[in-house]
Image (cartoon, rainbow, N blue to C red):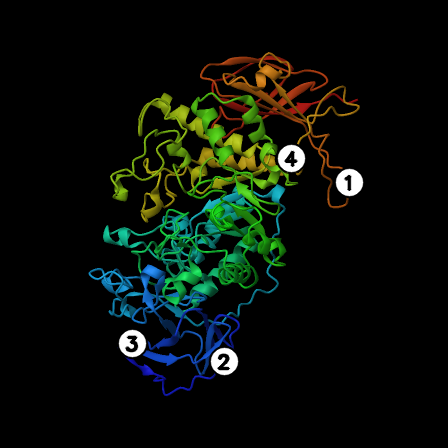
Amino acid sequence: MSRPEDGHGAAEVWPGSPAPLGAHWDGTGTNFALWSAGATAVDLCLFDADGTEHRHRLRETTHQVWHGRLPGVGPGQRYGYRVHGPHDPGAGARWNPAKLLLDPYARAVDGELTLDPALFGSRLDAPGSPDARDSAPFVPRGVVVHDSFPWDGDPRPVTPWSDTVIYEVHVKGATMRHPDVPPALRGTYAGLAHPAFVEHLRSLGVTAVELLPVHHFVSEPHLLRRGLTNYWGYNTLGYFAPHAAYSSAGSGGAQVTEFKAMVKALHEAGIEVVLDVVYNHTAEGDATGPTLSLRGVDNPGYYRLDGANPARYTDYTGCGNTLDVRRPQVLAMLMDSLRYWVTEMHVDGFRFDLAAALARSMHDVDRLSAFFDVVHQDPVVSRVKLIAEPWDIGEGGYQVGNFPPLWTEWNGKYRDTVRDVWSGAHVGVRDLAYRLTGSSDLYRSDGRRPFASVNFVTAHDGFPLADLVAYEHKRNEANGEDNRDGESHNRNWNCGVEGPTDDPAVLALRARQVRNHLATLLLSTGVPMLTAGDELGRTQGGNNNAYCQDNEVSWIDWDGVDEDLVAFVRRLVQVRRESPVLRQEAFFEGHEIPATGGTRDVAWFAPAGGQLTTADWFDTGLQTVGMYLDGRAIRHRDERGRPVVDDSYLVQLHAGPAPVTVQLPGAPWADGYEFVVSSEYPTGAPPRPAVVAPGPIEVPPRTVWLLRVLRRPA
């Protein structure tokens, strides 16, 4: 039901202000401001609790911003826009006032998206003609909010990059099956902040959670038609609003308060909050997608249109459209969003999905693009953690190692190399050595440091670690795409049997392979990222693309926890935290250390005991290598300028299927060795005695050892 404009109690629309954009309550009324360069008129639509709509024409425009202030309108008010203008899809113009549009700057969103023909801006039976059906009953609305929150000097952890351990986690999936989280809080922001879950993070030694998308998102029409939903959330509708379905307190604005309370609780536990953000595309999809927000506000102003056919979009994302970050207004929206989440919501950083799409100026990925420029100079955003997923699906989109200073990157080359090593593929020692020591081949030339490399073996996209060692072939039939979706080449090995098995030898081998991947990850220089549930033994039953599985396939199973594996991860993270030599802030040099008798800051040993030769570096058949790290040669200093000195370690990595005898190097490298971690044991704790002398020792098949160097007193 709707009423004519200015029908909301005959309320007068005051001129208001063009800034800031969005809906802002000042205590006595709310100012509304919407940018649209091509609109001919804009109606602000307010909704009563019963759904009755009241339209108010915004008659003021300043620099292409339509604005007005309504006295008496305050927090909790649901609203949207109807934007008038030409409807000529062939020219990129898609204005249609029959479609209720979400404010791009809405700070809270209420209501579900319901699949209906009215969602689409053009008639299917007459392409190019506007569809006159009203979409309001089927789309979410914005909510006016009050931004006040008792932060009380929120203790932001500000963890240095070199000390950071990231835990990639889904807000809902983390606690939906957690028995110690109250049922009403499971799957919510409050559930993530519950002491039962926070204590698990603290016990692991995690310093940051990287949350899968929490910007308000909706499901794609093709999923709704199949009775599925978008679980991961990479289908953003609102860049300023926390996803309402993750709120236990309702969607009338309380989701904002609940999100802030979650952040505060995590900060109090010493844990930073990093958001996975999707600024490369939106939920409106391709030219056949629904009209929900930006498309109806100003389609050519927000999206990259195909120059040869403006009815279509340039798609570097595989999701139907690409935001046009070359345009000042789009850049402004992205930066306003980033600053809002830092200043108002107190988050500590961002992981940018398909970040290469944000760096495209005309066609090629450009390291000097406007997006990087504005981020670099922004006094707020430049000071938080910035992580790029350094690729998109466009030509030349794989840009690992090519992002500028300030940025860290998901290191896809690290993932591929480590998987190859443990799956039995022939990998040159040279490539493995780069990955274990911070990938200087990728990040050193432009002045970045080892922590520019975010190291990972698994992520939300792909097999979890338990499945990586149990399946070689994806099992994605439940996604409804005839198993065509998902990656087919996963660089993995099933340990000889595909899928579930009762064979104790295979199960033991799989468990060791999981530990090998985790040990390699947590002993590598760089920033390790764990995927939630990998430390518990979580499986997806072979589904390596569970983006639409909002169910037990994706949720963490807290009843089937592998306690030994949890203990193994805790042990490794603790050793890492206590050992600066494992968290280097500068790249290794390989130089001899004065007054040590000839040791080096990093050295590489062949099984026979000698240092690797030039030929060894390119030997793709070598499956055993020792990495020596000297704690007397750390190049960074502490906060008071004092040298940092640590123990020295030998990491012995053997990926071969049979035992091998290696020569542990003697003086001057070591007078003895103490076992600290061994992947051959379920918890990583070697049996006593754990001290061995230099010389020959047999390394079991497929094993990682961490040995502490022992030296006699001078």
State the residue position of label 4: 579
State the residue position of label 1: 642
Q: Are marks 3 and 4 in contact (CB under 8 Å)?
A: no
> SS for tag 2?
loop
Horizontal and vertical percent for residue 563?
44, 36
Horizontal and vertical percent for residue 416?
47, 31
Task: Name the image quarter holding residue 132.
Answer: bottom left
Residue 120 appears in the picture as rendered: yes
Task: Name the image quarter holding residue 532.
Answer: top left
Quadrant holding the C terminus: top right
Q: Residue at x 32, y 67 (%)?
A: 87
Cα gap from disc 2 to disc 1, whole angstroms: 57 Å
* Marks 3, 4: nearer the viewer: 3
Q: Residue at x 49, y 14 (%)?
A: 659
> SS for tag 1?
loop
Say which label, 2 or 1, has the lower sequence index: 2
Cα gap from disc 1 to disc 4, whole angstroms: 16 Å
The mark total stands at 4
Please tell me how crowded label 4 is: few (under 14), some (14-19), or many (20+) other residues with Cα within 10 Å.
some
Please tell me how crowded label 1 is: few (under 14), some (14-19), or many (20+) other residues with Cα within 10 Å.
few
Cα gap from disc 1 to disc 3, whole angstroms: 67 Å
- The kind of residue tagged 1 is Arg
Q: Are marks 1 and 4 in contact (CB under 8 Å)?
A: no
On residue 50, the disc is 3
On residue 16, the disc is 2
- The kind of residue tagged 2 is Gly
Horizontal and vertical percent for residue 154?
59, 60
- Left of 450 or right of it: where is 82? left
Residue 568 appears in the picture as rendered: no
Say which label, 2 or 3, has the lower sequence index: 2
> SS for tag 3?
loop
